[in-house]
Every structure is written in C-alpha cells, then in structure tokens.
Amino acid sequence: MTHRIFSMAFAKVYPMYVQKAERKGRTKEDVDTIICWLTGYDQAGLQQQLELATDFTTFFAQAPAMNPNCTLITGKVCGVQVDAIEDPLMQKIRWLDKLVDELAKGKTMAKILRT
C-alpha cells in the first residue's frame, strides 16, 4: 500500500513544519538546520527541492546522505513508535516529524541533533 504522503509535495508540508516551530518561538532556520542534518542537503539543495516541489519519495531518494545518527531518533509520532516503522520511506518522514516535534517542544539543538 502506498501512503498518500509519499506523493505529496515536500514544499506543501514544509510551511507547516515552520509554522509549528514558529508558534513555539523557534525559527525557519532551526527547521532548515534539522532538515539538513537529517538528509545531508545543504541550504541551496533544500531550497531547490522546495522550488521544484518534489514529492516526499523524491525528496528522500535524492537526499545526499541520511545522517548516521538518525537511528538514534526514537519515540512516538501520532502514537506510532518511530523506531518500529518497517517502511524505510515512512520511517524517514516520521523521523523528520519527530525532530520538528522536539524543536517545537523546546529541546535544545544539541539534543535534537543527537550530538
């Protein structure tokens, strides 16, 4: 079964990540830092993905390098344990959701970025 989010444009969801962070006093730059940490995109690469309106499947398929520490991302998103998700693409999406949640909850960048 293919999830609807796989074909959704990353650029459609990205503003929601930023809004969630900004509502809690964090910045767009914080969100970008998290995305770049997770995927290996630099700022220009991230901007290009947003401009091209690539879907989540393409966004993660073209990611330069998933951070080796991404496996340290644990916990629940929407009641689902992220480290137990079997579909690799869905797990990447949920890792990103979890990082944005942590940002909005006020965690320090060092904790969010698993340093």
Image: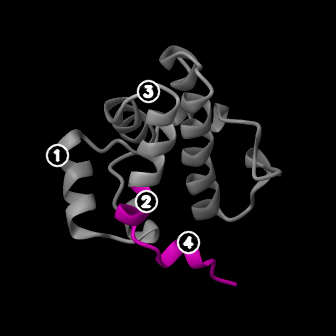
Per the rendering, the mark at residue 44 is 1
Task: Give the residue at mark 3.
Answer: 26
Q: Which amino acid is tagged 3?
A: Arg
Tags 3 and 2 touching, CB below 8 Å:
no
Residue placed furthest toward the front = 23
Give the main secondary structure of the magenta stretch.
Answer: helix
Task: Give the residue at mark 2.
Answer: 60
Q: Which amino acid is tagged 2?
A: Phe
Q: Residues within 10 Å of mark 4 (few under 14, many from 20)?
A: some
Give the mark nearer the N terminus: 1 vs 3.
3
Q: Nearer the viewer, residue 84 or 19?
A: 19
Tags 1 and 4 touching, CB below 8 Å:
no
Q: Which amino acid is tagged 1?
A: Ala
Q: Position of residue 78 (x, y in %)?
A: 76, 53
Query: Distance of mark 2 from mark 4, alpha carbons?
Result: 12 Å
Query: Distance of mark 1 from mark 4, alpha carbons?
Result: 24 Å
Query: Distance of mark 1 from mark 3, alpha carbons?
Result: 21 Å
Q: Position of residue 19 (x, y in %)?
A: 44, 44
- The boundaries of the magenta stretch are 1-14
Residue appearing at x 35%, y 62% in the figure: 11
Query: Distance of mark 1 from mark 2, alpha carbons?
Result: 16 Å
Q: Is residue 81 above or below residue 109?
A: below
Q: Position of residue 46 (x, y in %)?
A: 26, 50
Quadrant of the frame with the N terminus? bottom right
Q: Nearer the viewer, residue 13 or 59?
A: 13
